[in-house]
Amino acid sequence: MYRYDEFDHSLVKERVEQFRGQVARRLDGDITEDEFKPIRLMNGLYLQLHAYMLRVAVPYGTLSSKQLRKLADIARKYDRGYGHFTTRQNLQYNWPALKDVPAILDELASVEMHCIQTSGNCIRNVTSDQYAGAAKDEVEDPRIISEVIRQWSTFHPEFSFLPRKFKIAVSGTEADRAAIKVHDIGIQIVTNDKGEVGYQVYVGGGLGRTPMIGKKIGDFVPKADLLAYLEAVMRVYNMNGRRDNLYKSRIKILVHEIGAEEMQRQVEEEFAEIRKTGALNLPQDEIDRIKAYFADPAFEDLSDDAAELDAAIAADKGFAHWVKNNTAAHKKPGYAIVNISLKPIGGTPGDCSADQMDAVAALAEKYSFDELRVTHEQNLTLAHVRKADLKAVYDALKAADLATANVNLITDQIACPGLDYCNLANARSIPIAQEISNRFADIERQHDIGELKINTSGCINACGHHHVGHIGILGVDKKGVEYYQVTLGGSADENTAIGDILGPAFTEQEIPDAIEKIVKIYLDTRQDGERFIDTYRRVGIQPFKENVYEAH
Amino acid sequence: MAQHTRKGAKEQALTANRLIDGVVVYLTADGKLSESLQDAEVAEGKEAAEALLTRATPFVDANEIIEPYLFAVELEDGRIRAVSVRETIRQAGPTVRLDLGKQAELADVHG
Amino acid sequence: MKLIKNGKFVEQDFVAVGADDALPDGAVIVPLERWEAERDSLITRNTPIGVKLESGQHPERIREDLDHFSVVALDFPIYRNGRAYSYARLLRDRYGYEGEVRAVGNVLQDQFYFMVRCGFDALEVQDKITPEVFEQSVGAFTYAYQPAADDRPTVMSLRHRLAARADEARAAAD
Ligand code: HEM
Ligand code: SF4
């Protein structure tokens, strides 16, 4: 894991002091709310429906046990004993008091964490693959370049007042677990025919009111030039992005309006100029220095043969389900990747109690080299667990109510906070996810249905990624009543797609039945081995349209 | 913010968040702030509502509250009821965590 | 409005004139359109001249004329509109402009640091800004991660310097 040196510490500490002064000025009345609001937003502090909300950055989703324990402490001491993991791999507290925030930031700084650039129209926390460093087919660990980008983008003087927020995601494998094509910039680490590692760059993806899939404008950006290239994209956007209309200010609109080719031309031109100065050239020794932080932990030489594990699987059906769904192949023999579902049946997607955080921290410490990941699907990951330890990990997770064996199944849903917490919401999201979860609670049935992602957002801002859910649910407000619009066929992986609208919206009461019908049509239509999304791609929306509204 | 004000609503109350801790408060008839919707002053008609907004200004100027606004309410059996789902949730707490928010802290709140 | 130049509070030295205002004697800052329309006569004036670019006016439009300007004023119509940060960097880094780059408009205290790093050496600020506030704001951070138009060393270069020094010390100890 990356560790702060004196420079990183100094910047974060100075930021805390700066904000402490600003909060004091605000509480004393020296500055008005109008002046303070942009400042608090730059520090991740929003005002929600019931209280303030503080968003803590988890850079590229990586946490140490110590950091997670600190997050648990803060939840107990300053909040209501829980936190919410988000689709941007961050953590949100829902109830902090303004007067306590400087103290919270101090505590975070003590474990090398902060809330810098978790809000505002700047470059936000860089997100990445939760399997980084553990995935089999990885070209290079994406956290290395994510850390480089984190540093370059932190307090960037030119890009702190962009037309709109800016999100960057990095993937080091062909399988995309970071949803890079729905980010303002998506970076795919690739190898060229000479065997050199470099970057494919996508720009202009995004969700929200106008969902768009990123366009590839950089085919192979050499390692040393990545920051120069990113600076070029940012400058073109900063100068030309629209500022007259909030809904048209993301880079996706610029790319859409001028076209990907023109965008590419402008970026290339700017890139050539920046490159000439050499100021942003990234020397190999700097890459190596950061790379060293992400070197493999001390893996043991193990064999993949796991007779004991097989016996345990045979003896415990619950464990068998969990191994099947919640673990994934690791690059090292004898190891597995463990996904911890934050989607208990009927629970709030992404919520995690302080006690659960402590339990996970203990497991990470004991079984996964002291480190864990947050996923953009609002789950947690222990990246390096010995297969021989899986049963012990499972038992401990079960004791902490964290062993729901549903990763990638229909009850592993993404949901934004919605009207239960959010100031901007049109409708509630969490109860919808809960009702669906309860309806499909039976694990055998979930298995039979197979991989199916349902994503729910409480308004068009799409924090719940509804556009890219295999089934997407969007809350809308019709004359003060909550309604839900359903889309089908979205996907956020390497075959990214935006879902198609099914038809008229449903009421809260109708939604579980509608989902039930959609699932039934899939089950009746699927061919051997087809996932929901495969069937949908084969048959299209028509059979669903025809049958879901039947006899309504 | 789709749901808060309904144009032409006859009865309205005023809500804001307390600066120091973000807690939701309502403006009362005796010119104080209360955490309970039941203590809110209900203004009937446009003029009274505007007067209510004006009366919130000193609290803003004194840095006690932020983001004050009016929202529609109804009187039902002597109780004040928010009209929209949004304001109903705001005066009670998250519907998915009945142990949190005003519903858990104040005696007289229901969803 | 107060004017800060290179960290010092100074008297207003230029008069900003509108598109149709009569030109006073002495130093003036004119809007870009006026420069473009009246370039020939403005050049013959024997007093310093500045030009002001609005948020949509790319400095490319004055690139060839930069020698004529003592000041380029870049407008922030609202603090959220950060285009001028890029304009300032182009003026400094790419066009090599060495005259004054002045921030005007909605210039807030918490942005001084960013502005100075992007190459602004003059800021038109609210009256309530004091030298202490200015110092505190510009000096908010000891280190900077990324290169910009100021000549601060980046954290990366400082790290390398430290590492080199450590190597030397090691070599000397051997
Ligand atoms: C409750 C406080 C929140 C507020 C006020 C908020 C606000 C917004 C807004 C205004 C947008 C649209 C931006 C645009 O299209 O330009 C947005 C998008 C988004 N938010 Fe949130 N959000 C909140 C919570 C969350 C949470 C909890 C998550 C994660 C679960 C999240 C993740 C995202 C994502 C992934 C997008 C869409 C990404 C995109 O368009 O590129 N936000 N949010
Ligand atoms: S999608 Fe809308 S309702 Fe949900 S968190 Fe985002 S802004 Fe709030």
Image: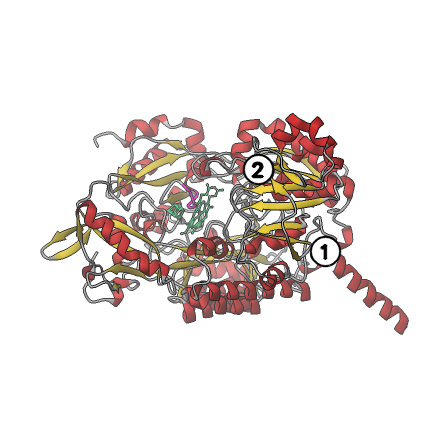
Q: Does residue B89 appear in this view?
A: no
Could you tell me which chain the residue with mark 1 belongs to? Answer: C
Q: Which residues are magenta?
A: A461-465
Residue designated by label 1: C154
* Precedes in sequence: disc 1 or disc 2: 2
Q: Amino acid at mark 2?
A: Ser
Could you tell me which chain the residue with mark 2 belongs to? Answer: C
Q: Nearer the viewer, residue A383 or A260?
A: A260
Residue designated by label 2: C55
| Dot 1 alpha-carbon crowd within 10 angstroms: few under 14, some 14 to 19, many 20 or more | some
Position of A544 compared to A403: left or right?
left
Residue at screen point 61% across, 29% down: C33
Please state, as top left, top right, bottom left or bottom right, where the C terminus of chain A lies in the image. top left
Which residue is most to the left? Answer: B77
Where residue A191 appears, as percent x and y from the top left, is: 70, 40
Q: Nearer the viewer, residue A382 or A257?
A: A257
Q: Is mark 1 within 8 Å of ligand 1?
A: no
Describe the element under mark 1 as helix, strand or loop: loop
Where residue A399 appears, as percent x and y from the top left, is: 40, 67
Q: Amino acid at mark 1?
A: Thr
Q: Nearer the viewer, residue A346 or B44?
A: B44
